[in-house]
Image: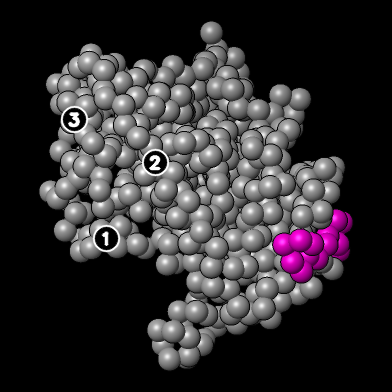
Amino acid sequence: MSDIMTAGDAIVASLEANGVRTLFGLPGVQMYPLFDALYRRKHAIRTVASRHEQGCAYMAYGFAQSSGRPGVFSVVPGPGILNAGAALNTAWSANAPVLCITGEIATPFIGKRRGHLHEMPNQLATLRSFVKWAERIERPADVPAVMNEAFRQMLSGRRGPVAVEIAWDVLASSEAVPAATRVQIEPPLAPFASAMEEAAKLLFAAKWPMIMVGSGAQHAAAEVLALAEALNAPVTSFRGGRGIVAEDHELGLSNYAASRLWPRVDVLLGIGSRLELPYMRWTKNYMQYCDVAEAPPKLIRIDIDPQEMQRLRPHVAVVGDSAVATKALLAAINSLGKKPASDRGHIAAARKLAATAIQKIQPMVAYLEVIREVLPRDGFFVREVNQIGFTSWYAFPVYEPRTYVTEAFSGTLGYGFPTALGVKIANPDKAVVCASSDGGFMFAMPELASAVQERINLVTLVFNNNAFGNVLRDQQLGFDNRVMCAELQNPDFVKLAESFGVEAYCATSPAALKPLLKSALAANGPTLIEVPIPRGSEVSPWEFVNFKE
C-alpha cells in the first residue's frame, strides 16, 4: 500500500516505524521539509534543539551510548556535516548506533562544483570514509527501503554510525511512497562448535584465567558473570565494558587492579573488546603484538566482527554475539566436568593494593570518591578528556553496564558536556553527572542554552585549572618548559552559567562538593558546579594506566 507524501514525511514515518521517539536537530535551509514533517509529528517524536552541529551529534551519541538505542540527529549538509564529523567519528570508535540525516545541494548541481550553498566535494564519499555505511535517497519512494537499510547496518553485527543524505529538491517533492515498516534484524550466526570446544578446553585447564570485556559485551552482563563465577576469573575493562561485572563484586576489578594480576595470567578471554590494555599498555614492545598474539598468555577472543580476528589474531577465535557465545562457552566448559574450586585471595589482594596505591593521585581521587558516594549505583558518569577523566579510568568504581560513558579511543576533547545532555535525555529518571573541565567545557559551552531551553537537569562539574592540563605537563616535562597555547584565560564559570539561567555554584574542596552535588542531583533543571584547581597542582594519573610488565 502506498500513500502520496513528501520525502520528509516518509523519513519521519520510517523513524517512527523503527521506534525512534527522539531526534536531535539543528535546522537549515536544505532540511526545512524534514523539520516541517517533524513538526506535524511532534506528538510522536521529540525534536531536541541544539546550538551547534557538533553538540547536536554528540547529544545523539550520548543517547545511543547510554541506552543502546539508536541516537538520531539531523543537520544541514556541507559545514553542518563537517561540524558533526567529530561526533560521528567518536561514534565509529565506540561502535555506537548513531544515525545522521542530512541534506544535499539541489540535484542538478550535485558534482558540478558550481558553488551552490553548502556544497562540498563528494559529501557522500566523505561520510563513507569514517562511518559504517552511508547512502543517498534519490526519490521519495526509496525512503522506506534506504532508511531500513540504514537501521539494519547500524544495528547488525558490529554496531556503528550510519548516514543518509537527500538532495534539497527531493526532500520537498512528493510521490507514492510504500508504507513504512520496522526493519527486521537477523539474529547472529552461532559460533563454530570446534572453536567453542577448543576455547572451553583452554579455560578448563587454566589456573589463572582473566576475562576482559569491552563495549561489545554490554548486553551480555549476566552471561559474563556466570562464566566468571564458574572460572573464578577476574573481570576487567578499560572503558566501554566497565560495569558489565560490578567493580564491587568479588570478581570485578578496576583495570589497574587487574594489571597487578597480568604477569601470572595463563589464559586471557577477550569478549567484545579490542584488548587495548594488555597488548598496547601492559606489555613491553607491544608493537610486535599488533598483528599476531604469539606470546603467553593463551588468547581467546569472542567478537561479532570476524575482521577483529585479523587485527589481533588469537590462539582461538570465536566469532559470534557476545551473549550467545559466552553462554555457549559456559555450557561447553561445564560439559568437561566440574572445574576445581580456586581461592580468590589473589583477586582481593590486587584490589586492596590498587586502592592504596592510587591514593597518591590527588586531588582527583578525593573528588572521584565524593562523586561515587553521592551518585546512585545506576547513575551515569560522563568523563571528559581531562585529569579527572584519566584518573576515573581506574579510580571511579562502576557498577552497572553503560553507566560509564566515554569517547572510546577517539580522545575527543570537548565531547563530554553535549554527550551528557544526550545521556540525560535518554535516561530522564536517572542521575547524570558530567565531569568536564575548563578546556573541554568551552568547546560546547553554548549548549548551556539548549540545556535550559529543553529543561535538561544535567549536573556538570567544571574542574578549572586554567590550562589544558595534560598539554601543560607534557610541555613542562618533555619540552624543557617551553609552554605554548596550554595556559588558558577563562571566564567566571559561575556567572557564565547564571547568565544562561543555569543554577551555578563553586566548590573549593571535595568536602564542599558533596552537599552541592546532592542538591544539584535533586534539582529540576541544569546545574553547573565549578571546581577550582591550582594550575599544575594535580598529580599525574598516567602511572596507573601505562603499566609495563
**Looking at the picture, which amino acid does disc 2 mark?**
Gly
Return the residue nearer the eye: 444 or 190. 190
Q: Calculate the distance from the C-alpha at mark 3 to the C-alpha at mark 2.
A: 19 Å
Would you say residue 510 sits in the magenta stretch? Answer: yes
The picture places residue 36, in percent across and down from the top left corner, at 71, 35
Answer yes or no: do the residues labelled 2 and 1 have beta carbons within 8 Å? no
Residue 549: which numbered mark, if any?
1
Residue 409: which numbered mark, if any?
none
Q: Please give the residue where the numbered disc 2 appears in the rendered image.
A: 345
The picture places residue 494, in percent across and down from the top left corner, at 82, 66
* Residue that appears at 60% across and 50% down: 382
Q: Calculate the distance from the C-alpha at mark 2 to the C-alpha at mark 1.
A: 21 Å
* Residue that appears at 26% across and 25% down: 340
Quadrant for the C terminus in the image: bottom left
Above or below 219: residue 444: below
State left or right for residue 146 relative to residue 28.
left
Element type where label 1 sits in the image: loop
Residue 205: which numbered mark, if any?
3
**Looking at the picture, which amino acid does disc 1 mark?**
Glu
Would you say residue 243 sits in the magenta stretch? Answer: no
Number of marks drawn: 3
* Residue that appears at 49% across and 66% down: 541
| Residue stretch rendered in magenta on the structure | 498-512
Q: Is residue 125 visible?
A: no
